[in-house]
Image: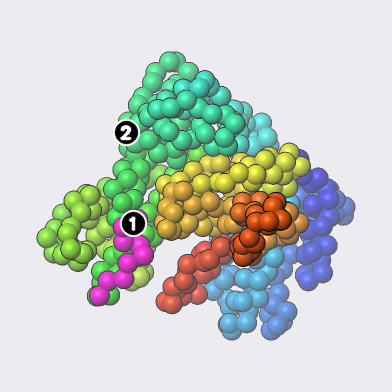
């Protein structure tokens, strides 16, 4: 558990060094002079470059699991020069790192008014109390149970039941997320529903939905299943085309749109397994009346992706590819779909980090053996998701699964790279040394070292462990707005 008083004091010192005056409010919404008792910080945001006051900011740690930033209406549109905008983004990035360092979620939003009123502050207090008093049977780190053929994850009012095609070896990390023969959602009344796709993210998202009063066949349930169906149809297409270059720009645009759509769906389904994300989804869900685009020439689309022979498995994906491309064209023209906006907001960046000693020890055990990427990197993501939950790392796993070794790629170098990039230098160095020792141990022994009469053989140089895995080439046309979204900054 975070020491909230230390966090409050550190946050106050961070803010006071740049802004004044800073008004402090305690967890009951009353004004206070004690920074360690403060849970809400209100102050005017002023540019250090131009000296202009741009609006009011409110930083809340009422919910001890999250740092919430609220800014007054239209403040981002008040920037007059690029330096002010870059200064604002740098400020938000600093707060994001602060939240991450203290194992907190990070949320930024427009409060649509000039400043918080006392009534607004009491609403925040009441919301906080509601969160504390709410019965939350589902934890953010759900544990497995079951037998050698069955795995179960309990979500409170419902549970996910998995039947395996082979016996589960509990000595292997992530074994209960593999060899899935069938999946079921089971209610506390004993009702059981078989899911149409054996995708773990679908199982967890649907079980979360049922646990919160939903039904497998209601509109939201069908929407969740529809995302899995679309992923299923896009998966083979994405694997087959993502590393190919086509002659015309429009076909390349279709491939890029399909890959982007697939990744967005994957992140959304994974996010719905977490309670807070599901609440956001349920509150904002609107039935999707958008049908697949019917007016398209299937033969013309096939011709775009022909090598020497067309693989019929691509046919089922083509309507989804065309729709993804049309949606991407609409977004480029400013007509962004509500679902796309919601899915962008749902992506959190990091939600689990190895800061607990028990997590570090568990990571050490897992890193002793190769961690295989699995299809689309899902196997590796599942193996460490309770220790390192990171969209960037999951994407690295997905990219690694497309390499020469495919699903059999060992992704430990990707984990080491993530640790080094996120301030876990000591762990990164420890695991680099571990891999180096394992590689050295696998080198052939020179017979001359064992038998003086044997002819010496040339030494085989030990494999060099790179500081981080090779990264895919950056897209040349990735504009600044997309970079901000990827960085978690709107």
Magenta stretch, residue numbers? 238-247
Residue 404 on image: x %, y %: 42, 58
Q: Is residue 20 magenta?
A: no
Point 27% across, 71% down: residue: 246
Magenta part mainly helix, strand or loop?
Answer: loop
Q: Is residue 339 found left or right of 437 in the rendered image? A: left
Camera-side residue of 321 and 420: 420
Above or below, comparing residue 216 to residue 36 in the picture? above
Q: Quadrant of residue 184?
A: top left
Helix, strand or loop under label 1: helix
Give the numbered dot on residue 238: 1
Above or below, comparing residue 487 to residue 99 in the picture? below
Give the numbered dot on residue 125: none
Camera-side residue of 439 and 29: 439
Crowding near the residue tagged with mark 2, few <14, some 14–19, many ≥20 C-alpha atoms within 10 Å: some
Mark 1 or 2: the one toward you: 1
Give the labeled residue for mark 2: 196
Looking at this view, name the residue that lies furthest to the front: 453
Q: Quadrant of residue 402?
A: bottom left
């Amino acid at each position: 558990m975070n020491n909230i008083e230390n966090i409050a004091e550190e946050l106050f010192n961070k803010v006071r060094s740049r802004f004044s005056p800073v008004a402090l409010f305690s967890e009951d919404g009353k004004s206070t002079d004690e920074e360690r008792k403060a849970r809400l910080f209100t102050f005017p945001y002023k540019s250090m470059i131009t000296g202009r006051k741009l609006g009011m900011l409110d930083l809340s740690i009422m919910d001890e699991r999250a740092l919430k930033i609220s800014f007054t209406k239209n403040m981002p549109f008040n920037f007059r020069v690029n330096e002010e905008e870059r200064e604002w983004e740098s400020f938000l990035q600093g707060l994001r790192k602060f939240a991450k360092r203290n194992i907190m979620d990070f949320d930024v939003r427009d409060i649509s008014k000039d400043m918080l009123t006392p009534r607004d502050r009491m609403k925040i207090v009441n919301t906080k109390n509601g969160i504390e008093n709410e019965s939350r049977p589902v934890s953010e780190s759900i544990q497995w149970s079951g037998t050698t053929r069955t795995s179960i994850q309990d979500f409170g009012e419902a549970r996910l039941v998995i039947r395996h095609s082979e016996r589960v070896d509990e000595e292997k990390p992530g074994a209960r997320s593999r060899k899935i023969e069938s999946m079921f959602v089971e209610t506390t009344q004993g009702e059981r529903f078989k899911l149409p796709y054996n995708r773990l993210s679908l199982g967890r998202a649907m079980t979360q939905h049922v646990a919160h009063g939903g039904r497998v066949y209601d509109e939201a349930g069908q929407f969740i299943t529809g995302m899995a169906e679309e992923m299923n149809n896009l998966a083979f297409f994405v694997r087959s085309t993502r590393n190919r270059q086509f002659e015309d720009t429009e076909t390349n645009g279709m491939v890029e749109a399909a890959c982007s759509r697939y990744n967005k769906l994957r992140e959304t389904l994974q996010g719905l397994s977490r309670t807070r994300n599901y609440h956001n989804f349920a509150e904002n869900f609107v039935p999707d009346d958008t049908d697949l685009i019917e007016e398209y020439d299937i033969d013309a689309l096939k011709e775009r992706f022909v090598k020497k022979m067309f693989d019929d498995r691509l046919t089922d994906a083509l309507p989804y590819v065309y729709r993804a491309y049309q949606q991407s064209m609409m977004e480029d023209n400013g007509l962004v779909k509500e679902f796309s906006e919601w899915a962008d907001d749902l992506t959190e960046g990091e939600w689990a980090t190895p800061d607990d000693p028990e997590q570090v020890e568990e990571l050490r055990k897992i890193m002793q053996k190769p961690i295989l990427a699995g299809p689309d990197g899902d196997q590796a993501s599942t193996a460490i998701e309770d220790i390192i939950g990171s969209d960037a790392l999951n994407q690295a796993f997905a990219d690694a699964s497309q390499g020469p070794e495919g699903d059999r790629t060992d992704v430990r170098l990707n984990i080491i790279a993530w640790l080094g990039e996120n301030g876990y230098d000591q762990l990164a160095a420890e695991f680099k040394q571990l891999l180096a020792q394992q590689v050295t141990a696998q080198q052939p022994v020179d017979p001359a070292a064992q038998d003086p009469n044997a002819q010496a053989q040339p030494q085989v140089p030990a494999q060099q462990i790179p500081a981080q895995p090779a990264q895919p080439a950056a897209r040349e046309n990735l504009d600044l707005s997309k970079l901000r979204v990827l960085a978690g900054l709107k």
